Amino acid sequence: MKKEKDYVGDIAAIRSMMERTSKFLSLSGWAGIMAGIYALMGAYVAYVYFAFDPDEVTQVPSDEGIVLPKLIALAVAVLVLAIGTAIFLSYKKADKRGERIWNTTSRRLLINMSVPLVAGGILIFVLISKGLIGLVAPFTLVFYGLALYNAGNFTYAEVRMLGLMEIVLGLVGLCFIGYGLLCWAIGFGVLHIIYGIYIHYRYER
Amino acid sequence: MKISLASLHKAFESRIRLGIMSALAVNDTLDFNSLKDFLDVTDGNLASHIKALEKEAFIGVSKSFVNRKPNTKYFITTAGKKAFNDHLKTLEQLIKSQKP
């Protein structure tokens, strides 16, 4: 007959297997921190150099024709940097855990995030094309929050909480358009950094 | 407390079989390669354990073709789910009863 230790080991093995096969846990806390820093830098550049701080829904920077493409380029650069860093750091973390970064769980995570993100991305292009610049920052927060809320089922449960906070910030930004950029900086910058530090200390040490 | 050791199913004595059942308990279906990655075992090893579980009718197989390549997916059967849950319960009881 088996000894007690074996039974405990069996249960531990079952638990770890259930978790490993249903959740992608190679997301790196550092990726959150870095994404937050990029976002803060991006918001600073937009505010100081491009004077981007719409007070009203339809307000656009005075020399719109030149600044708008630059703003979009800035936003895309921040996005690419953040995603690139996240992939790189997750790849390293997965490697350390003896996992592959592209497996059933990561695929499921991405598919579930991509629906709200793609819908939000298209909506934002429509908003820009119609000149509703003041709505862009709040709407990115809302849709990103929805994606994270969805993703919470397939990775750390804390991601769900982060998603809810992003949604609330986005809705606040919609009510007070003048604070849209500030809410964006808090949501994408400060919250990411806090979340990253939390994940790092809770799971990575 | 008397605990029936009969509900500790022989099929679950191996850690790998226990792992297969755990993975399939929380996923609708998994293909062979995903299982192999999660369990970190060789093809032959995994295949023989899968065959044993299939023989007990604890897991089922669905075969289809994706881009003309065979794609085999495994899922847990109702009987398998019940046996696995009973096994878990018994394990928990055993641990409890052995604590002073």
Image (cartoon, rainbow, N blue to C red):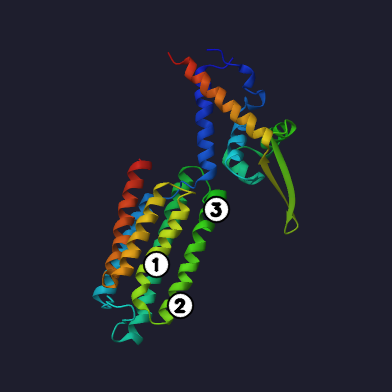
Q: Residues within 10 Å of mark 1 (few under 14, many from 20)?
A: many
Circle 1 is placed at which residue position?
Answer: A140
- Residue B56: x and y, percent? 72, 30
The answer to which quarter of the image holds residue A42 is bottom left
Which residue: 39% across, 70% down? A77
Q: Is B41 placed left or right of A112 in the picture?
A: right
Q: Quadrant of residue B76?
A: top right
Q: Is residue A170 left or right of residue B65?
A: left
Give above or below for A71 relative to B11.
Answer: below
Q: Secondary structure at mark 3?
A: helix
| Front-most of residues A63 and A146 | A146
Among numbered discs 1 and 3, the one appearing first in the sequence: 3
Label 2 Cα crowd, 10 Å radius (few <14 / some 14-19 / many 20+): few
| Amino acid type shown at disc 3 | Arg
Q: Residue furthest front?
A: A175
Sequence-first disc among 2 and 3: 3
The disc placed on residue A126 is 2
B65 to A45, vertically: above or below: above
Q: Which residue is mark 3?
A: A108
Quarter of the figure with residue A181: bottom left
Q: A49 left or right of B23?
A: left
Residue drawn at (52%, 62%) of the image:
A115
What amino acid type should be assigned to the residue bearing mark 1?
A: Thr
Discs 2, 1 touching: Cβ within 8 Å:
no
Compare marks 2 and 1 and give the one earlier in the sequence: 2
Residue beneath the point at 26% across and 78% down? A51
Q: Which mark is residue A46?
A: none
- Name the chain letter of the residue that bears numbered label 2: A
